[in-house]
Image (cartoon, rainbow, N blue to C red):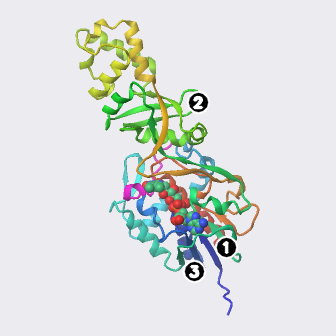
């Protein structure tokens, strides 16, 4: 007997695929939903998110400009978040018994600090769908009847896309730390490993800049400021084979303010050794390193610093030069910049412009964000939008 139930095939049992299925099961009770997953089990990546704690969303309360969090897709996300935003995400999980908490930067986590709670909640919500694991679909074996939703994430799903009537923005990695090239200063930078300061980063000659905590590692720079810059400049850095100059403002303050502060210290602490001051809240080891990099003898007195010395210190403090020589993954947390071009889909429904009944959601779209829960929020939001359109058509 042929079934007359509405049939929806979802390719990819990640965050977007499972959330889309969960929404559909609620909106169209009894719908025939099949999820195809290449890996051995669903939601394997979700279990690793947020270092195993799953930073599932963000309150967005500290965000005044969405371009700063979604370097790709900010215009779309502005509208989309009104359809299904962070409050809707929080309500959905709370309604299913998940207690949530907000950490610094508006990052939302389960109180349990356990990503498996989020995985289990989603798996419960999709128990009415069938999930076929170990099934990597290719252009040749895609289901031909019913509605098809592609939620294959970044990177791995690109081969599948090449068989579909969409434009693809070439994928490149985003969210990585910077390796700093070996030069005379590198050994001493290594000795500062583990120090974290609020800093400003920029790539000279470009508009790419970021601010936030900068962590010195044994290979170079990491922490939110570096990850954010890697996201803003993802395509630029890929094109330059991850080799580029990097300027560090160790104070995150404008140069004239730094110069004024240094002159003030020279006047107030004239007899004190330069190395024993701690301006701008910099840790002692880092301050000494920066003084040395300015060509100043750290044991001299402030009084002996002429205007040239102040200028040299201020230049290093606000525009210290390094060379990026490669990239390193941060805690294996990365996203893909690129994917299905947003001009290939109807932005209200996420349906392919060239083929009715074909939808996209999640990281497979050319939408990606900096760290902070914004990537998963994009997955929930786009999955909801696709599900809503599909439900209204069934
Ligand atoms: C280690 C790590 C930690 C992260 N932590 C966070 C975080 O805390 N907060 C946050 O917001 N973001 C985080 N991210 C990013 C976030 O996980 C992704 O943006 C999100 O998972 C995207 O969801 P998705 O469903 O679109 O893709 P995915 O979760 O990648 O799911 C896609 C699924 O499709 C399957 N698939 C691919 N191709 C095929 C095919 N041809 N046939 C069948 N199946 C296929 C894959 O196996 C996969 O299971 C993290 C990323 C990583 C790697």
**Figure quadrant of residue 118:** bottom left
SS at badge 3: loop
Question: Which residue is under mark 1?
Answer: 141
Q: Nearer the viewer, mark 3 or mark 2?
A: 2
Q: Is mark 2 within 8 Å of ligand 1?
A: no
Query: Is residue 118 placed above or below 260 in the rendered structure?
Result: below
Which of labels 2 and 1 is toward the front?
1
Mark 2 and mark 1 lie on one chain; the one further toward the N terminus is 1
Label number found at residue 349: none
276 to the left or right of 49: left
| Residue pictured at 48% horizontal, 71% vertical | 40
Residue 179, quarter of picture: top left
- Please tell me whether the stretch drawn in magenta is mainly helix, strand or loop: loop
Quarter holding the N terminus is bottom right
Q: In this view, does 202 lie to the left or right of 190?
A: right
95 in relation to 66, above or below:
below
Instruction: Spot the residue most to the right.
Output: 354
In this figure, what is the number of numbered marks? 3
Q: Does the magenta run of residues contain 358? A: no
Tell which circle, 3 or 1, labels the residue nearer the N-terminal end.
Answer: 3
Q: Earlier in the sequence, mark 3 or mark 2?
A: 3
- Residue receiving disc 2: 206
Assess whether mark 1 and mark 2 are in contact (beta carbons under 8 angstroms).
no
Please give the residue where the numbered disc 3 appears in the rendered image.
29
Q: Which residues fall within the magenta stretch?
A: 49-63
Q: Distance between the residues labelled 3 and 1?
A: 27 Å
- Kindly identify the residue that appears in the image at 60 percent across and 47 percent down: 72
| Residue furthest out toward the bottom | 1
Give percent across and percent down for residue 51: 38, 55
Query: Residues under labels 2 and 1: Cα distance?
Result: 44 Å
């Amino acid at each position: 007997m042929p079934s007359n139930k509405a049939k929806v095939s979802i390719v990819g049992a990640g965050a977007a695929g499972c959330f889309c299925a969960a929404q559909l099961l609620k909106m169209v009770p009894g719908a025939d939903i099949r999820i195809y997953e290449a890996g051995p089990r669903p939601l394997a990546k979700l279990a690793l998110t947020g270092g195993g704690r799953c930073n599932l969303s963000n309150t967005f309360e500290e965000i005044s400009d969405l371009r700063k969090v979604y370097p790709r897709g900010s215009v779309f996300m502005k509208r989309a978040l009104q359809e299904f935003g962070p409050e809707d995400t929080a309500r959905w999980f709370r309604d299913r018994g998940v207690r949530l908490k907000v950490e610094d930067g508006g990052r939302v986590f389960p109180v349990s600090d356990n990503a498996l709670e989020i995985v289990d909640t989603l798996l419960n919500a999709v128990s009415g769908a069938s999930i076929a694991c170990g099934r990597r679909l290719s252009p040749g074996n895609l289901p031909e009847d019913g509605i098809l939703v592609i939620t294959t994430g970044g990177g791995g799903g690109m081969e599948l896309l090449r068989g579909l009537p969409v434009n693809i923005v070439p994928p490149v990695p985003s969210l990585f730390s910077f390796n700093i090239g070996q030069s005379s200063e590198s050994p001493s930078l290594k000795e500062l490993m583990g120090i974290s300061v609020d800093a400003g980063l920029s790539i000279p000659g470009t508009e790419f800049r970021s601010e936030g905590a900068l962590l010195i590692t044994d290979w170079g720079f990491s922490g939110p400021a570096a990850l954010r810059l890697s996201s803003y400049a993802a395509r630029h850095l890929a094109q330059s084979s991850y080799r580029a100059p990097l300027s560090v403002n160790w104070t995150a303050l404008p140069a004239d303010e730094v110069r004024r502060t240094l002159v003030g210290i020279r006047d107030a602490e004239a007899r004190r050794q330069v190395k024993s001051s701690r301006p701008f809240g910099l840790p002692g080891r880092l301050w000494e390193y920066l003084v040395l990099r300015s060509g100043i003898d750290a044991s001299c007195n402030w009084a002996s610093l002429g205007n040239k010395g102040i200028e040299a210190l201020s230049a290093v403090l606000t525009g210290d030069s390094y060379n990026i020589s490669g990239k390193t993954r941060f805690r294996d947390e990365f996203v893909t910049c690129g994917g299905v071009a947003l001009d290939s889909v109807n932005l209200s429904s996420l349906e392919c412009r060239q083929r009715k009944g074909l939808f996209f959601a999640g990281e497979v779209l050319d939408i990606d964000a900096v760290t902070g829960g914004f990537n998963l929020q994009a997955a929930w939001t786009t999955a909801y939008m696709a599900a809503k359109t599909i439900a209204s058509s069934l």
